[in-house]
């Protein structure tokens, strides 16, 4: 039951289209078995003395006095009948396509939405390549199953039923003779494709290896050339390419014997039907028309039956694909059961004995963190790589949830505030910001799509990005990201700042977000911003002491704990980490001067 | 439109030249092509002849009621069975061979060319474009030139065979049956290209969706922090909706085509029913002849559909062919001159016995360099470096540091002026000669899939295991290598993905060391690594530099101070030159740069490493 639900749960909503399509297919398969009977009707009934095997209602339409009139009627009725059939084929195709594409559309959207709502923790641990595979290839596998494979199996089953029925109507013995090899062909196809899967995988692996060598030979061209290893690369590629060629050719050879072999079986079936048919006709137990109809009906089913074996042999793929999709869907959304409370924030932030560790790791990344920040204050958080600075900020915007203590914003416990409302009001500027494959302008106005050109330009100017942009060939309309221009780390960081400038926010966090910008520009930007953000609570996360020293207050974090707090002047006087860092800096300064004197 | 724009559908005219050249690649496969084609011809003939066997059965055995002929009839079936199945096996095997070998030849040629192409080519050609030529285009082309060609032969011959057979059997019925042909052809041409076009749109849309998923996953953190979930979803939904609508439209086209063919062929059948039936009743033809015509009319539409499909695909494959040929035809703009090739050999077969030893003296003589777009990066640049000297290049991004290094490596050649190595213009020596004595340590170390051992050995392919391990020890890479279960035989993953940045850097030092180059290029990493590795890297830099002409694009103070000479560059000009101490004392650009950049880095580093 669970297995069936796995297959059907994505079909809800427009299932009637599917049922409609399948019903038409059912009727169509019956209709498909009729043309051979028209031939039988002409030869056995019109020319001969035997009864027609056409269904009764059709025979009635074909009643006439002369042979000529009867032939005209057969011709006209067969065309009209085909017209109906053709319309039904069309309708069925459109219905099924609509259904299938609707299912794929829904599935893709659901997956995308769900992926976006999965926790930050999930995303940091997920393998992108694997996820992409699931949401594209696996979805396609399922789409093919719904739209083609399952339909094909249904079609074949109905056709087999109706063809057997028509055969039985004409001659029972001949029916058995005509269907005797079919199960063998089906079994061979099924077993063959179950087993050949392994070889398919081998071919795919060989191709993957070749592609890797190719990709590395192209992206690593600098190294290849610098070491003069072109010949080696060509050899390596030739070797991989040869293995792939041989594997793939081996598969073709196997396929050749399968198709050739089953062709022989199919002809054996034809030979049986034809020989016995002729024998029975001569014996008088079968009409000539019936004989011809048998050959035609046999032709309808015997070729597709090996495809049927193939499709059923392939079903396992869909089960695996759906399992992989469900693994994503089984993860719960981070917005599930989130509060609706969305206050307008002032920017007073309090941490009270906050601790945090990942569920699967008992080591605390933050321990007993306490501090208090008033609205409008600028606070620097300084600490070494891995000291927990960024984790702290993740807690502040609930990318991660703390386990102990309290985080209060304007007195509200943070977990009572709606996540999205919270994040909308706390502007976080990341060290490695992600740009979307849109134009520069679109990236700047990403949070406020209605922003006009002037606003965008002035934001870019403030972030010292404008001059860079106008130097691009297409200026603000330059595409960035995967399919466009690659921006430098510093340009990305400045763009991230520009997009934050479109609208005031009560709290802003710079998470090492000017690390790739040179010192001079860094200073200019911060000066420009301090005017704009006079009333904003600003956090500056950094390991650059020169950046930290300008803040109203500095919080020093080490190994997950607040070790010092105070202004720059206070901290350099107090013994501790800050002082020793400051000393290192002074020492470097001294060295510089000394080196200058020595030389 | 952009040269690199993918898959734009163009209604290209048939270009004989392209196909001639592509067919030339099939020359070594001539025999196989001929065998496959013969099998296809036999199959087509068998398909036409097969209904005649039943004609014999109906008109001779049934009509006469004489079962003595039945064994002959059965014998005929056995013959067909053997003939058809063996021809099917033959044609699949040989077409498959042509397909796989042709793809192999195309890839080989293109890859060889890729390795010959200079750096500037890679500067202006996206990797994705190259990959597409090498994978999907070569596949498309080899498919169409094997299966497509054979299907074309089969389909064409079957049509001719059917027409001839019909006329031989009965001219009147043949003419009646053929009335459907123009309609079949018209419908096929009308629909085929449209269906192909629709499917191409779907593919394009599909790759956009994949891109969007990629972005949704890769940008998850940014999306969350900016709360862009809804607007991203709206964008995404627009893509999937388009995909759905395109797909349905394609299904409607395809859904019109096949039924319309059935309908046309049913009209032809009905005509045969009537005229053939009348002839049977008048005794002009036998029942067997009526049977054969009914079968033939039904058989007719298959090759027509097949041919329409193949012709449309040929059109598409021509575009693939043009693109692959354009890759193969790209002339490397950095090449050894004929005289140099004559004396020093080619990349394929170098004449190393003629190679002079390389000492490592490097001279720039009035070198000017412009990129393709015409932007001048270096202008009448002069520099003379003794063998064994260490030069640090410093300056802002775009100052020309990388260009100088790329020129030394002969990844680019001077637009004007000369570069001399050991006093000789390097264009008078082979590229291989220079590259054999060149070592390169990259900012972002590029490793290749394979083991650590293979990666170190990449510096000198004939190095022994001992030499590999020795090199690793010299840069202290053995510490982490030994900690791996499989040691030197540990797989590094694609591009070295399973190693940390620091580990990759150390391996790339070992790789450069084993090459024992006379000239070493060191493009120092800006990314920070943990203390332990940082120390090893500093030590490795000293080890690797020893006794070699070294050019360093430096970011660390400790590295710069080790240089014999520092060149401060600005917009392609040396604005200051000297040792660290001299320059600091001078209090000029270097001093400022130093205070701003290196000092800051130093503090950041100490911050991380205390």
Image (tube, rainbow, N blue to C red):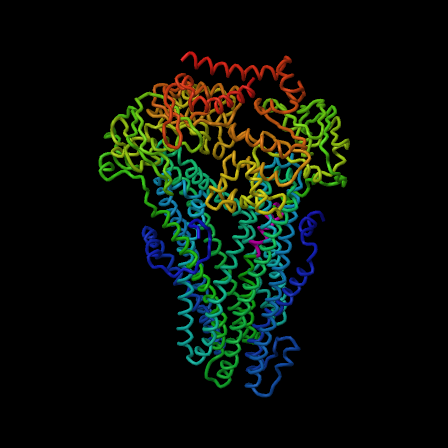
Residue extent of the magenta highlight: A308-320
Let me know if residue B87 appears in the view: no
**x then y, percent, for residue B239:** 59, 52
Residue drawn 47% across the image and 15% down it:
A593
**x then y, percent, for residue A97:** 61, 59
Q: Is residue A298 magenta?
A: no
**x then y, percent, for residue A336:** 73, 41
In this view, the residue farthest toward the front is: A531
Q: Quadrant location of the C terminus of chain A?
A: top left
Instruction: Say left or right for B72 vs A279.
Output: left
Let me know if residue B175 appears in the view: yes
Q: Looking at this view, is B97 or B6 the one in front?
A: B6
Q: Most prominent secondary structure in the magenta stretch? A: helix
Residue drawn 37% across the image and 59% down it:
B37
Q: Looking at this view, is B605 or A550 the one in front?
A: A550
In this view, the residue farthest toward the bottom is: A65
Instruction: Say left or right for A252 vs A308.
Output: left
**x then y, percent, for residue A431:** 57, 32
Q: Is A189 drawn above or below residue B261 in the view shown?
A: above
Instruction: Say left or right for A455 vs A506.
Output: left
Q: Is A391 drawn above or below residue A62 in the view shown?
A: above
Q: Looking at this view, is A196 or A358 the one in front?
A: A358
């Amino acid at each position: 039951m669970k297995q069936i639900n796995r297959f059907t749960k994505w079909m809800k909503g427009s299932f009637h289209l599917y049922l409609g399509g399948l019903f038409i297919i059912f009727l169509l398969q019956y209709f498909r078995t009729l043309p051979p009977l028209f031939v039988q009707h002409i030869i056995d009934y019109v020319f001969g003395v035997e009864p027609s095997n056409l269904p009764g209602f059709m025979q009635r339409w074909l009643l006439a006095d002369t042979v000529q009139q009867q032939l005209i009627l057969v011709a006209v009725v067969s065309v009209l009948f085909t017209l109906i059939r053709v319309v039904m084929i069309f309708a069925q195709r459109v219905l099924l396509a609509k259904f299938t594409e609707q299912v794929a559309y829904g599935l893709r959207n659901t997956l995308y939405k769900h992926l976006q709502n999965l926790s930050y923790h999930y995303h940091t641990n997920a393998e992108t390549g694997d996820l992409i595979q699931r949401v594209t290839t696996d979805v396609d596998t399922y789409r093919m199953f719904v739209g083609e494979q399952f339909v094909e199996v249904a079609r074949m089953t109905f056709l087999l039923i109706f063809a057997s029925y028509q055969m039985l109507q004409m001659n029972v013995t001949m029916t058995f003779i005509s269907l005797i090899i079919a199960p063998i062909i089906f079994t061979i196809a099924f077993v063959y494709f179950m087993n050949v899967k392994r070889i398919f995988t081998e071919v795919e692996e060989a191709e993957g290896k070749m592609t890797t060598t190719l990709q590395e030979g192209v992206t690593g061209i600098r190294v290849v050339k610098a070491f003069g290893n072109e010949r080696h690369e060509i050899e390596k590629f030739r070797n991989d390419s040869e293995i792939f060629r041989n594997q793939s050719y081996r598969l073709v050879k196997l396929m050749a014997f399968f198709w050739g072999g089953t062709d022989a079986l199919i002809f054996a079936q034809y030979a049986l039907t034809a020989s016995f048919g002729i024998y029975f006709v001569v014996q008088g137990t079968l009409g000539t028309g019936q004989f011809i109809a048998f050959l035609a009906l046999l032709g309808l089913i015997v070729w597709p039956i090996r495809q049927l074996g193939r499709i059923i042999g392939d079903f396992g793929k869909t089960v695996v694909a759906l399992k992989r999709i469900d693994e994503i869907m089984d993860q719960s959304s981070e917005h599930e059961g989130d509060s609706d409370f969305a206050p307008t924030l002032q920017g007073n932030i309090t941490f009270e004995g906050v601790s945090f560790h990942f569920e699967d790791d008992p080591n605390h990344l933050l321990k007993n963190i306490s501090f208090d920040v008033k609205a409008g204050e600028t606070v620097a958080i300084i600490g070494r790589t891995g000291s927990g600075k960024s984790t702290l900020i993740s807690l502040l915007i609930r990318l991660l949830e703390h386990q102990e203590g309290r985080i209060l914003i304007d007195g509200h416990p943070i977990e009572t505030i709606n996540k999205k409302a919270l994040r909308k009001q706390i502007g976080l500027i990341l060290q490695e910001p992600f740009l979307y494959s849109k134009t520069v302008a679109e990236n700047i106005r990403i949070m406020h799509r209605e922003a006009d050109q002037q606003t965008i330009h002035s934001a870019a100017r403030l972030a010292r990005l404008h001059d860079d942009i106008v130097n691009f060939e297409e200026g603000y309309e330059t595409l960035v990201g995967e399919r466009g221009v690659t921006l430098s780390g510093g340009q990305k960081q400045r763009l991230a700042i520009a997009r934050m400038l479109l609208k005031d926010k009560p709290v802003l966090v710079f998470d090492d977000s000017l690390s790739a910008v040179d010192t001079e520009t860094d200073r200019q930007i911060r000066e420009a911003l301090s005017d704009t953000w006079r009333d904003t609570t600003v956090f500056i996360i950094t390991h650059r002491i020169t950046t930290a020293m300008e803040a109203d207050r500095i919080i020093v974090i080490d190994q997950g704990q607040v070790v010092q707090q105070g202004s720059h002047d206070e901290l350099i006087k107090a013994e501790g980490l800050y002082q020793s860092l400051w000393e290192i800096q002074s020492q470097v300064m001294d060295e510089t001067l000394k080196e200058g004197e020595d030389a | 439109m952009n040269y690199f724009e993918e898959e734009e559908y163009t209604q290209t005219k048939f270009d004989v030249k392209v196909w001639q050249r592509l067919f030339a690649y099939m020359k070594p496969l001539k025999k196989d092509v001929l065998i496959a084609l013969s099998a296809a011809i036999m199959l087509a003939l068998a398909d036409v002849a097969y209904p005649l066997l039943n004609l014999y059965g109906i008109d001779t055995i049934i009509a006469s009621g004489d079962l003595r002929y039945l064994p002959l009839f059965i014998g005929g079936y056995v013959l067909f069975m053997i003939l058809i199945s063996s021809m099917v096996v033959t044609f699949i095997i040989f077409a498959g061979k042509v397909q796989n070998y042709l793809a192999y030849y195309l890839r080989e040629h293109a890859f060889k060319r890729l390795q010959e192409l200079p750096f500037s080519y890679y500067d202006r050609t996206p990797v994705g474009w190259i990959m597409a030529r090498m994978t999907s285009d070569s596949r498309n082309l080899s498919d169409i030139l094997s299966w497509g060609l054979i299907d074309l032969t089969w389909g064409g011959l079957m049509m001719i065979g059917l027409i001839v057979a019909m006329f031989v059997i009965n001219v009147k019925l043949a003419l009646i049956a053929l009335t459907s042909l123009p309609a079949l052809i018209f419908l096929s041409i009308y629909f085929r290209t449209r269906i192909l076009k629709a499917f191409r749109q779907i593919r394009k849309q599909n790759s956009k969706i994949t891109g969007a998923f990629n972005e949704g996953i890769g940008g998850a953190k940014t999306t969350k922090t900016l709360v862009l979930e809804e607007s991203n979803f709206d964008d995404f939904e627009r893509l999937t909706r388009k995909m759905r609508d395109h797909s349905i439209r394609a299904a409607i086209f395809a859904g019109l085509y096949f039924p319309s063919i059935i309908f046309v062929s049913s009209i032809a059948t009905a005509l045969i029913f009537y005229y053939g039936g009348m002839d049977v009743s008048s005794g002009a033809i036998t029942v067997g002849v009526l049977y054969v015509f009914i079968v033939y009319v039904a058989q007719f539409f298959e090759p027509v559909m097949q041919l329409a499909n193949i012709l449309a695909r040929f059109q598409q494959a021509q575009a693939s062919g043009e693109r692959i040929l354009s890759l193969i035809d790209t002339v490397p703009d950095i090449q050894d001159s004929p005289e140099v090739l004559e004396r020093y050999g080619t990349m394929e077969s170098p004449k190393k016995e003629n190679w002079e030893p390389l000492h490592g003296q490097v001279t720039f003589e009035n070198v000017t360099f412009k990129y393709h777009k015409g932007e001048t990066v270096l202008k009448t640049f002069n520099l003379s470096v003794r063998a064994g000297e260490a030069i640090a290049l410093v300056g802002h991004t775009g100052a020309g540091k990388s260009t100088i290094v790329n020129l030394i490596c002969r990844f680019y050649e001077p637009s004007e002026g000369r570069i001399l190595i050991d006093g000789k213009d390097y264009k008078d020596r082979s590229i291989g000669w220079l590259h054999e004595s060149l070592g390169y340590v990259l900012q972002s170390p590029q490793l290749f899939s394979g083991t650590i051992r293979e990666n170190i050995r990449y510096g000198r392919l004939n190095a022994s295991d001992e030499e590999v391990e020795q090199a690793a020890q010299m840069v202290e890479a053995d510490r982490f290598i030994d900690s791996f279960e499989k040691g030197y035989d540990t797989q590094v993953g694609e591009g070295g993905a399973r190693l940390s940045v620091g580990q990759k850097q150390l391996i790339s030092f070992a790789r450069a060391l084993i090459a024992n180059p006379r000239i070493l290029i060191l493009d120092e990493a800006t990314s920070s690594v943990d203390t332990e590795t940082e120390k090893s890297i500093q030590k490795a830099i000293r080890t690797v530099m020893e006794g070699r002409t070294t050019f360093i694009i430096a970011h660390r103070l400790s590295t710069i101070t080790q240089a014999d000479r520092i060149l401060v560059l600005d917009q392609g000009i040396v604005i200051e030159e000297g040792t660290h101490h001299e320059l600091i004392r001078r209090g000029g650009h270097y001093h400022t740069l130093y205070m701003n950049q290196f000092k800051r880095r130093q503090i950041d580093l100490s911050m991380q490493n205390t």
